[in-house]
Amino acid sequence: MAGDGKDVFFIGYINAVPQPLGRFLAVIGLIVVVVMAGLGLLLSQRTADPGWAVTGYQHIELRGILEARPYPVLRVPDGEGRKPRAYLLAGEGKYGVQSQADGLYGRWVTVAGYLLKRGTLDMLLVDDKEGIVVASASDVLHPAPPQSLGRWRLTGEICDGKCYSGAMSPGNGLAHKACANLCLVGGVPPVFVSTGAVSGSEYFLLTDNKDGVNARRFADFVGQLVSVEGEIERVDNFYIFKSDPETMRAAGP
Amino acid sequence: MSVTLKPVIWYRSKLVYDGVVLLAMALYIIAYLRLAPTLQLVSRPIDDAILRMRAFGSCAFLMVSFILAIGPLSRLDRRFLPLLYNRRHFGVIACSVACAHVYYVYSWYLNLSPLNPLLALFSANTSYGQVLGFPFEIFGVLALVILLALAFTSHDFWLSFLTPRLWKSLHMLIYIAYGAIVAHIALGSFQASGDPFFVMIVCASALGLVGVHLAARSVSRAGEGTAGDDNWVDAGLISTIADKRARIIDLGEGEKVAIFRYDGKLSALTNLCAHQNGPLGEGRIIDGCVTCPWHGFQYRPEDGCAPAPFTEKVATYRLRRDLDRLWLDRRANPPGTRVEPLPISEGMADGR
Amino acid sequence: MMRCGVVVSQAIVSFLYAYGVAGLVAALLFLLLGIDRVEPSARGAYAFRPLIVPGLVMLWPLVLWRWWQIVQGRGADMSVRRSFLVRHAAAWKALAVVLPIMLFAALALRQSGPYELPAVPIDQRAMSVESGR
């Protein structure tokens, strides 16, 4: 028994560690250090890919008509070889821009900010200092009215439009739910990320079928896989999902 | 303790111990935050803050799991006992790592919203009625509050001020904290990241920990004598107790007695050290005193009192003998009561 | 639901602030008036005192109760009870049951997506969009 070190008695305040025990402890220490370093590397490396997105480094200025759909949307007409595009708007931090947009709906405005882009979603983060400024009317034709794509049942995740479009990496999932809910409460438009595409798009601005902007009603379902029915509309490049909250269900595995 | 209180008492062994713990922690964090991202191909990098909350969160979990494993491991193999000696510092470091995790969650997920972050913590997610999407943060809050309370009361002042009884009760909350941490991970990270390797590590740690505790329990039972019903219980043969060591007798309901043999005499003390309930019977007689294997607290075998200037006392028990057979009175004396040691006559002393 | 949550959270946060302020006052009082009287080992020792402030603030009701008890001269029961071993064993038995159930349930409920569940057209117009693709 005495030879294998199991019988050595250690007293912390006596500094000398008897030898067979010292070697054992050194080995344990080394194993702990190596295992921890290895685990750190492996666990971090296996982090899921957050997906490609343009993440808001580019400062741009856009001119277009401000619409309430019902979240503030900037319709930028075609020109200079571009197709007409619609941009969702949000503010800095976890805020929407409803208060800045109020009273400007239907008018030509200039908006400066940072571009987020993911799939068919374009979002402009309005620069707090420059804000939304009324611009002179243009002679370009008015934007096309929304086109209905009928009623669908989609399965997917409710996210906040800002984090998912590229402001956070990753900006979805249940670990992110509290953050997403705070964004929605602050007025950031919710988006529905569908597992199946409709007319080529998997991303939808999520409203309810009464066109309300009360995103709180979605709060319990944010971040998890749900299925829900509703009508889909296309506005230029982007899609609106007017969901029926009564049909919302957690999707089973 | 009755010597003057100091902020931290350092020994070389403590410095080495803390050094190894800090090194393991630092390498984990560096590998997680700096090394792994350079070896990874992703469409865009993970946010620094999110990577940090994952790194510090998982690190804190692994550390707490390891800390809780030290006790049963040292019961299974006595060579782990030195790890127990400075467990307190290990715990404080783990609590700091958990705080770093919270800091990044707080400043990234909960900040910059119309609500004050502390208010946001409790009100952002109120889906208490469902399992998926349950506000798992609340389990994290519970665990953090407990870890903080334990770290804050880790100084010896608290042990003496609150009394060992209250202090120990407070520190038993670590088991609730561990359950809360596992719930926090199971309802949060498991549902979000879905990395099977991480899931495996968490399950293996938690279930492995339960496993070593149950194993240690069965081992400590197997090695001890058990008592009868009468006030005087059979404590086995004198000749089978090694010199300067003890035999532990289980009186049932968690009450254990350590019978020490030293200098041709026998004395019985409770098996629980007054400091942190270390198993005195697994210690030995050093300089004429029973020495606890956990933190080296000492007691005179004949009266259970710590030698001056210390003031701890433990309960003593009476012994009598019948030839080589030893009998123990199961009725404990008040802590510090002197009991005349039972002499062993020469003929009996050397068991064959 | 969230509105109600905000009211409750507001109450929790106000309570936490009040508790913290009371804790600071109690800690100050204890360090100025109490500690030398209740803890003989603390006499003449000052360097360790900042270390115990967070604990005093966090556990102030307990601190005041112990302070009162010691001033009243009620002998503290310093003996360690055997029941700790029983409670320790009980805690691990409970964890041995709770942890596996929790982990298993969490894994069973996991929505291990992303699934490729297609969008399902419901009305005529949607079906024509579907077929036009």
Image (spheres, rainbow, N blue to C red):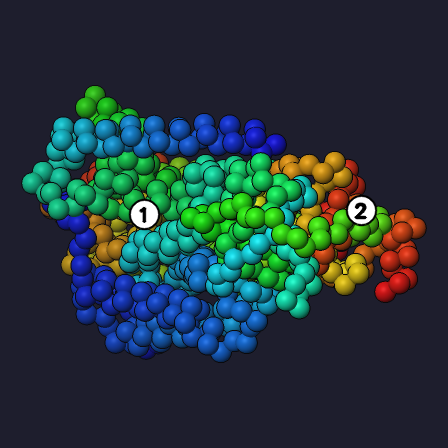
Residue A213 image offset from top left, x and y in percent: 65, 38
Looking at the image, is B338 positioned above or below residue A172? above
Residue A49 in the figure: left or right of residue B225: right
Residue closer to the observer: A204 or A80: A80
**Secondary structure of residue under mark 2:** strand
| Residue B190 position (above or below residue B122) | below
B100 vs C83, nearest the viewer: B100
Q: Quadrant of the N terminus of chain A?
A: bottom left
Q: Residues within 10 Å of mark 1 (few under 14, many from 20)?
A: many
Few, some or many C-alpha atoms within 10 Å of disc 2 (few <14, some 14-19, many ≥20)? many
Q: Answer left or right for B345 relative to B198.
A: left
- Mark number, residue A231: 2
Percent x, y for residue A119? 66, 63
Quarter in which the C terminus of chain A is drawn: bottom right
Give the quadrant of residue C113: bottom right
Mark 1 or mark 2, whichever is nearer to me: 2
Identity of the residue furthest to the top in this view = C72
Secondary structure beneath label 1: helix
Q: CA distance from mark 1 to mark 2?
A: 55 Å
Question: Would residue B343 be visible to someone looking at this image?
Answer: no
Name the residue tied to disc 1: B151
Label pair 1/2, CB-CB below 8 angstroms: no
Mark 1, chain letter?
Answer: B
